[in-house]
Image: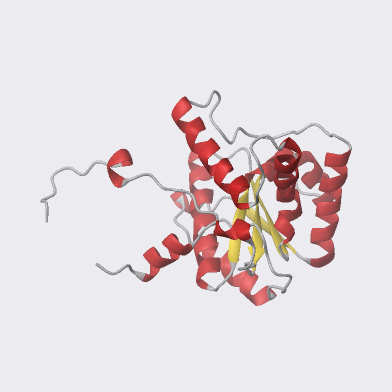
Amino acid sequence: MSLSHVENALSARHSVRAFLPDPVPRADVERILRAARCAPSGANLQPGRFHALTGGPLSDLKDALARAIAADRPMVSEYSYFPKPMSAALKAKQRAAGYALYASLGIEKRDLAGRKAQFEANYRFFDAPVGIVVTIDPAMGKGCFMDLGLSLMAGLLTAEDLGYGTCGIGALANFADVVHGQMALDDNEMVVCGIALGHPDASAPVNATRTERDRLESFASLRGFSET
C-alpha cells in the first residue's frame, strides 16, 4: 500500500538542528501560521499565539538568552513539560533519544561540556533564520493545550511540505521570564515552546538523527475489525 501525501510528510518530518543561513520569505511564514490555525479547536477557542522573529528581533532574543545563561540565571519554567517523577520506561526513551543525538555529533556520554553546549544551542534556535515563540493564556484549560499541540503539528507539517525544516524547542520555557522581558509579552501569555524554522543543512550529521516510534500494537487496540 502506497503512502498518502500526508503520511509521506509525517514520515519525512524530523527535528532539524542545523540550518542554512538562507532567509525564509515572510509569505511562507504567514502561510505556515495560517495553516497552524486551521487545526481543530474545541468550541473554536483557537488557543495560543505565535510570534515569528527573524533578523534583529531574533538576534536580540538570542543575545538576551545567552546573557541569562552566562550569568547562570535560574531556570523558571511556567509549566511541567515532563512527568514528575518519570517512569523507567519513559526515562529509557528519553535517554535513547539523547544518546542518538549526541552520537551523531560525536559527543561521548561523559562529555558533559559537549552535552551542555549542544543543549544551549536550543537557545540560539539552532541558528535557524526564523525563530517562533509560542504562547498560551495560562487560564486556558488542559484541553486547550491539546488544541495548541494540534496547531503546532499543522504548522510543522506545512513547513515540511514547503521544503523547510523545523525543530520544536520546549527548553525555551526554561527561560520564560527572559523571553517575556525581551519581547514585552502580555501578562496573559505563558511561554510554551519555541520553533526553529529554515532550510535544513543536508551536510550536517546532526540532521541524520532519527528517533524510533512505538509499534502500533504497543499503543493502540483495534476492536470489532475484520482481519482484512
The reply to whether residue 188 is visible in this rendering is no
Horizontal and vertical percent position of residue 150: 48, 53
Drawn side of residue 188 relative to residue 42, left or right: right
Name the residue: 86% across, 52% down. Answer: 63
State whether residue 125 is above or below residue 203: above
Which residue is more in the foreground, 75 or 133?
75
Total number of numbered discs in the rendering: 0
Horizontal and vertical percent position of residue 200: 62, 67
Name the residue: 78% across, 39% down. Answer: 177
Drawn side of residue 159 relative to residue 20, left or right: left
Q: How is the image coloured?
A: secondary structure
Name the residue: 59% across, 59% down. Answer: 207
State whether residue 204 is above or below residue 61: below
Horizontal and vertical percent position of residue 94: 53, 37
Horizontal and vertical percent position of residue 97: 53, 43
Which residue is more in the foreground, 96 or 82?
96
Query: The N terminus is located in which quarter?
Result: bottom left
Name the residue: 71% across, 47% down. Answer: 118
The reply to whether residue 46 is visible in this rendering is yes
Which residue is more in the foreground, 219 or 20?
20
Query: The C terminus is located in which quarter?
Result: bottom left
